[in-house]
Image (tube, rainbow, N blue to C red):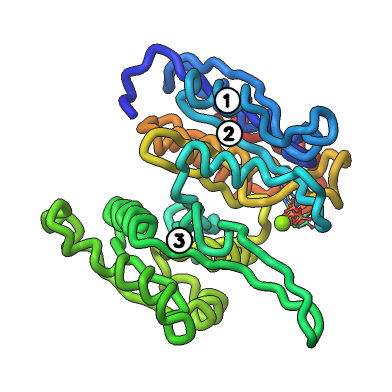
Amino acid sequence: ASPTRQSLKIGLIPGDGIGVEVIPAAKAAIVALGSDIPKPDFVDLDAGFECFTRTGVALPEETVRVLEEECDCAIFGAVSSPTRRVVGYSSPIVGLRKRLDLYANVRPVTSVAADPNEKPDVDLVVVRENTECLYVKQEELKHTENGKEARATRLITERASRRIGQMAFDIALGRPRKHLTVIHKSNVLSVTDGLFRETVREVPTLPEVNGKYNDVQVAEQIVDSAVYRLFREPQIYDVMVAPNLYGDILSDAAAALVGSLGLVPSVNAGDKFIMGEPVHGSAPDILGLDIANPLASIRSAALMLRFLGYVKGADRIDRAVDEVIREGTVLTPDLGGKGKTSEVVEAVLKKI
Ligand code: ATP
Ligand code: MG
């Protein structure tokens, strides 16, 4: 991405549930930056379960085409996931990650220190592999003499493990501590997790890497013990890289440490496209109440801009969010406040 564009075309895919309530906040934060970024040009795009019930398709081809051919980046809200199987429906976000080859899901989890000069207690990044593991969704159900038997395929490839490893090393290199923890369960799954662990650990020795990652300190940890230590001593972690499912669970767990899922942003990143996405889901339990926390979406907009190279704009948004949290006067109920979504958005925009 070259920060020399004249304008920035941004796809907006609110999706379902509170996605519809929080994505406008991300848009407003970007608009508020003014000339710190190229002139933003937004395009609204359809996808999700509601789209499926209306049109019969969860991820319209037109949405994929506009993203691929016209957009520089996008922001995705959330999609409702029916708990029972619905014939013909498959998750559009999983589909988009595949179609746009967004192989990494990068999830920074940070707490806000009371004093802006102090270090936050939690300041880590979960780098989650985004294309394989159990998410290849090859499941089968058999009826046997002893009753039903269900199986799922878990795919780990050297290629995907290597590129997620490279992304994780790059992110670690760009942070003050330069520390990377490889998360796995190779004591039990020695073939699949063994391959992930070996491949990521070998990244610094690849010929093309040419010593670039020499300053990154690497550790590794079994996933269950990582969850335990994460809850006891979150300060020890800097960057964590994990296969898809462990990364998903670890980042929701880490979100609990900073107070709410409604605070944690992510980007889905590939070599050619960046898509911001709050870590939370569609939160049907709070839909329509104007109490969804918009900060995860606003931070996702900032993270997307950061990945595109617009660091100054990203910093401005992040500082505004931190100040609103620090002041604590306008916060949504998930953070113990009485504020409405719209009031929090207003407070952030004023700071920007
Ligand atoms: P989905 O299937 O779409 O993931 P879910 O039922 O798992 O939906 P999540 O969105 O993952 O719901 O949320 C889990 C819990 O966290 C819910 O109780 C929800 O209300 C709360 N939550 C999630 N996001 C936010 C937010 N932005 N603001 C406030 N609360 C939130
Ligand atoms: Mg959920």
Q: Residue 185: where, in percent of width, then height?
A: 47, 79
Q: Mark 3 = which residue?
A: 124
SS class, disc 2: strand
Residue depicted at x 50% and y 80%: 229
Cβ–Cβ under 8 Å for marks 1 and 3: no
Residue depicted at x 74% and y 33%: 57
Task: Name which residue type carries label 1.
Answer: Gly
Depth check: 179 or 284 in front? 284
258 is higher (above) or lower (below) than 228 = above
Q: Mark 2 = which residue?
A: 75
292 is higher (above) or lower (below) than 26 = below
Task: Name which residue type carries label 2.
Answer: Ile
Cβ–Cβ under 8 Å for marks 2 and 1: yes
Q: Cβ(mark 3) to ligand 1 < 8 Å? A: no
Mark 1 or 3, nearer chain start: 1
Q: Mark 1 = which residue?
A: 11
* Dot 1 crowding, Cα within 10 Å, few <14, some 14–19, many 20+: many
Q: Residue 209: where, in percent of width, then height?
A: 17, 54
6 is higher (above) or lower (below) than 314 = above
Task: Name which residue type carries label 3.
Answer: Leu
